Amino acid sequence: MVGRVILMLAVLLLAGCVDPAGVARRPGAGGTGAAASEVYRSLRVETGTHTDGITVLAADADGSLLLSGGADKTARLWSLVDGAERGVLRPPIGDGDRGRIDAVALSPDGRLAAVAGIAAGPLADAALVFDTGNGRLVARITRPGSTDTAGGVERLAFTADGRRLGVRYRADGATRWYGVPDGQPAVEAGPLPPGSAPRALPLPGGRRVEGAPDGGLRMTNANGSAVWTVQPVAPPPSALTVSADGSVLRIVWPGGDRSFSVATMDDEPPTAPFAAAPPDPSLRTDGAALLRTAADGRPLWRTVLDSRVLAVAAAPAGGAAVAALGDGTLRWFGLEDGRERLALFLHSTTGAWIAWTPDGFFDHAEAAWNLAGWHVNRGHERAAEFVTIAQVYDVAYRPDLVRRAHLGAGRAASALAAGDADRPGEVLARGLPPTVTATVTPDADRRRATVTVEVQDGGGGIGRVLYRRNGVVVALDDAGTAAPLRLRRSVPLIDGPNQIEVVALDATNAVESAPVRGVVVDGRGGGRQGALHALVVGIDRYADERMRLAYAAGDARALAAALSERAAGLFTAVHVTPLLDEHADADAIAAAVRRMAEGMAETDTFLLFLAGHGVNLKGDYRFLSHDVRRPTLDEVARKGLSQDRMQELLAAVPADRAIVVLDTCYSGGVAEIVDRNLLMRTAHNRLARATGRGFLSAASDEQVAAEGYNGHGVLTAVLLEGLSGAAGREVTARALGDYARSRVPLIAERTFNLAQVPVFTLVGRDFTLARGRP
């Protein structure tokens, strides 16, 4: 496997890149204060609960619906029966206290919700009225003479008939009445009736709801026993300490503690050595901002945040200050300039984590991508939108940039991003993703389902529409047309439950809509073991001599022979097709997959093996097929197998059981090992999510690629061991992937003194690939 190299084009780009912004943007802001509310975009935590203290509560007349306002600048609807969340109301927000909620009210019938406090926008004491059924902002009520610096709203209440809303203003203590939902001044209706309460709300029958400073909720009966509880997931820390270099932190929460390393993005064992940095008296907070002063008291910098600062610690060796914020995040700032480097959210109960840079590039623990997203203001007269980070996964998932940001290479990360990434916030600025409605109707025999879809343009146009079955992309439509778009698709079902999910992408295929799901409980796709179809590709003889390899084609031949031998008798048939060297251009690979797909059933198994050069462009993997003649940016960008093309090909594969193996490597020295493995993980996870298929990927440096192991690349050598029985008597996809994950790093370290870390993802049920030797 000589020089099976991932061309590090990002590094080549870096030499010619500059940071277009010049300096780091203020954390969380897409604009400048309240006046830019229309373009304000803020990365925020979203856990399905308040992530900061609950400030005020209100209920409807019959005691079935609860409205809570929080310091996290959201208002949330809850069932008073069982505490289940019923929706989120998102007013426009801004920096500091802009968007803070101090007052809420529910109409007696629960159809309208009013929220107020310090509003974002030109008038700080505006009251916002939402439709609780769809979350839309139906009225923005302002008083004559209001200003941007007005004192805000102190209290809200509806009249008993729900037709008028009373607003008590903090500036003068006066109460004014307005019609709803038109927002026009109305006849005075006397003093404000009861209906809301700060944090503790009495209800009929002696029941009581309490909101906690940590975002939790609790309902009790008249005797004080709990009816239901909503546990906080981001309680304020009671202690925060940081290592001198800022890489390890220890957080103490009520009832527990945690040590976490941002160098490895993993928990530290309790016995790990830890030297806390000493306190730094130059760092302090005034609640809304983090600031640093000189020894003589002169201000050095002040960074305004959109959440209150609870604790701060210095990491002088890392040139960083680390702050715990009221929204549950931990944030790293440059000690010299106060610019944000990194945000980290640690889920206090599940252990999940998600980290992101100020530009919105992120890394995450397994299945934790929905824990954060973009709050996007759409002007002062409309409710804000929330776009989860998962919806911009193919733009924003960049563990390599997260790592660079933590190391303090802010300008290097920005320069790399300028040439090898699209900043997520700027992508969202081009327009929001589409909205989708869909129905799923199973056919009478339960073998297929008809999906009826309508797509509306959210501002960014309409691109691909993806249909997923239990996470696997089984069909796609390239829409490319104006809204509204109406489609019908027949989707094959498998035995048992089938969750059908539909998402639509924007015109650039960069941002997904929120998913719409339907479930067919009892699909009948047939459960028998079908045939095995394997396409094994290996390319040594590239046209450019600098790209020629030694082991790729041989690895493909060896794997084809092993599969033919070890899979015989386990399947109704075994079809293995090698494509080597000049026979393996992109069109030939695509044609081979399509031919296999034509004779394939849902009960079959499919394996795709790609050995050769690979490239990571803007985080997307691209396999360099034989038609790539030169290793130039233009050639690589136009040719080869891109992520989009692989998504299209795999969507046409009917087999429910499928895995893709990528045996490609990256040329680099020891100093770049961390980045190389991160780049492979980036490409792997994007591919796995884009297709929903199982993936096994490995990256190694040029020395490993050149010398090989037992006449093969390290990953292929390990796969051959596993198929022969080292992975078990019955070799399943999971067993083979787990064997590779444990064996490859050992060989790479012992033989080459280098780190090679395979990445393995299996979606859905495990499945058999071969029978090992007894």
Image (tube, helix red, strand yellow):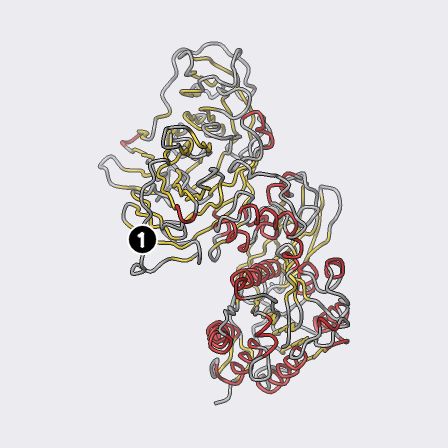
Could you say where residue 201 lies in the image, as x and y percent from the top left?
A: 32, 29
Could you say where residue 742 lies in the image, as x and y percent from the top left?
A: 46, 73
Quadrant of res 108: top left
Instruction: Relative to 126, say whether 346 is above or below.
Output: below
Residue under the point 63% across and 66% down: 6
Residue under the point 59% across and 60% down: 683
Residue under pointer 1: 275
Q: Residue furthest front?
A: 296
User: In front here: 720 or 247?
Assistant: 247
Residue under the point 60% across and 86% down: 568
Q: Secondary structure at mark 1?
A: loop
The N terminus: image quadrant: bottom right
Number of numbered markers? 1
User: In front here: 270 or 689?
Assistant: 270
Could you say where residue 170 lies in the image, as x and y percent from the top left?
A: 41, 16
Name the residue type under label 1: Ala
Q: Residue furthest left?
A: 223
Please tell me how crowded label 1 is: few (under 14), some (14-19), or many (20+) other residues with Cα within 10 Å: few
User: Is 700 placed left or right of 346 in the picture?
Assistant: right
Instruction: Relative to 140, say whether 424 is above or below.
Output: below
Instruction: Relative to 300, say whether 533 is above or below.
Output: below
Could you say where residue 455 lies in the image, as x and y percent from the top left?
A: 67, 44
User: Is 181 placed left or right of 172 in the picture?
Assistant: right
Can residue 79 be seen by looking at this rendering? no
